[in-house]
Amino acid sequence: MLNNFEIRIGTQFIFGRNVVSQVGKRMRGMGIHRVLIHHDGGKFLYDSGILNRIKESLQKEDIYSTELAGVRPNPSLSLVRKGIELAKREKVDLIFAVGGGSVIDSAKAIAMGAATDDDVWDYFTGAKEPVNTLPVAAFVTYPAAGSESSAVAVINNAEEGKKLLVSNEILRPAIAFMQPELTSTLPDFLSACGIVDMFSHVCERYFSPDEEIGVIDRMAEGILKTIVAVGSKVLREPDNYSCRAELMWIATIAQNNTVGIGRVQDWATHEIGNELSALYDVPHGATISIIMGAWMRYVYKKKPFRFCRYAKEVFDVKSENRSDEEIAYEGILRTEEFFRGLGMPTSFKDFDIPTNGIEDMLDRIAFRGTDDRIGGIVRLNRDDCRAIYTAAFENNEQQ
């Protein structure tokens, strides 16, 4: 059932081949004069020529640019603070992110901080609500997080050992440039991390306690099924433009809440997995591939109907006179098989995570609500999450 909802996706998308040639004119059309280009400083940006082409396009329109490099996976608060200081000093009127989700999230945080004298971390802790921001532009080089049109930013505070998010409509970028052919040279592991991430963003919305199946569910199933088909193919055929374009757009719609409106969402996999990133700097896609199977095994018997449907609609699991639980479990095995086929880990052992860190991770999960739990389809307390972490170490394949 669709509950009441409100959604506004104000991002303008410029999608297709060679869209970099439009950057300067689009910025000029928005009335932009001074920009801070934010990126990770990675070799790809220089080898591909994309960073220079963006700068040249801006220069042609007499738009001043300065830049800040250094973004890493799990973007850091310390770099955000440097960006805020630079943006204020240079009096920029837009933050231009060139990269993937980590870069775009960092740019969003800089944009919030540059528009106010507040401590930007207060927005992530919930101490204050953001009310203003500089506009953000995103040139997507790594499709995964969907941050180019989402209302969310995630930042890691290494000093406090916390990775927190802020969600607010003002965070949606004003414009996103999406050039699929650029992604053909991504390393396989990065492509696979992105595929897992976009898959999980749909799952977090699909696994709802609502047992009525409607249009949003069928949209989600179609997207997941496409990711499974295209995700494996793109690693075999990295220059396949059609596959790259499909995945780039899927990453966007997976996270802009199109398939999450009007429903209770889950997000337990992300909340449990985020603590791996915060404490051990594990790439986000890898934390999801490690945690998702363990989470599914822990909760599926309590809501077998939706997991059974997932198995049938996404992985074409046949009934064959089996129970819903049996069908659902095969869907879980197929999910992990899909992840492993991409070269992704499905156990802590695959990533050499120490077994003595579970309690530290549990201490950092933001349990909340009147029941002091997380999750949507099944509400999970500290003991539940401990069991999921333990299962992720063991990768237990028994029902």
Image: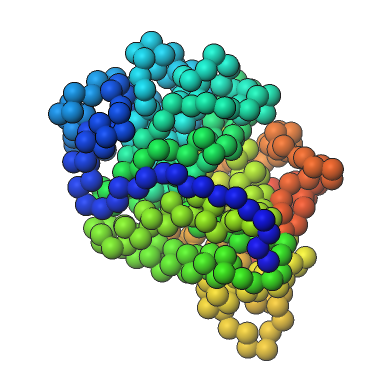
The correct choice, above or below, for 186 with respect to 233 in the image is above
- Along the viewing direction, whichever of 179 and 399 lies nearer the viewer: 179
Between 380 and 152, the residue placed more toward the observer is 152
Could you tell me residue 339's position as x and y percent? 49, 59
Q: In what quadrant of the picture does the N terminus appear?
A: bottom right
> Quick one: which residue is furthest to the bottom in this view?
321
Name the residue located 67 percent from the left edge and 49 percent from the top edge. 268
Residue 105 position in % (x across, y down): 47, 34
Name the one closer to the observer, 202 or 338.
Answer: 202
Tell me if residue 154 can be seen. yes
Q: So how many labels did they put on this image?
A: 0
139 displayed left or right of 306: left
Q: Classify 43 as above or below 372.
A: above
Asked which quadrant contains residue 36, the reply is: top left
Residue at the spot 30% in from the left edge and 21% down from the top edge: 34
> Residue pushed farthest right?
370
Colour scheme shown:
rainbow
Point out residue 135 in the picture as x, y percentages from the top left corner.
41, 30
Which residue is farthest top? 89
Rendered-image quadrant of the C terminus? bottom right
- Does residue 184 appear in this view? no
Q: Which residue is rendered at x = 63% and y = 28% of the image?
A: 129
Residue 69: image quadrant is top left
Residue drawn at 46 percent across, 55 percent down: 253
- Rendered image quadrant of residue 367: top right
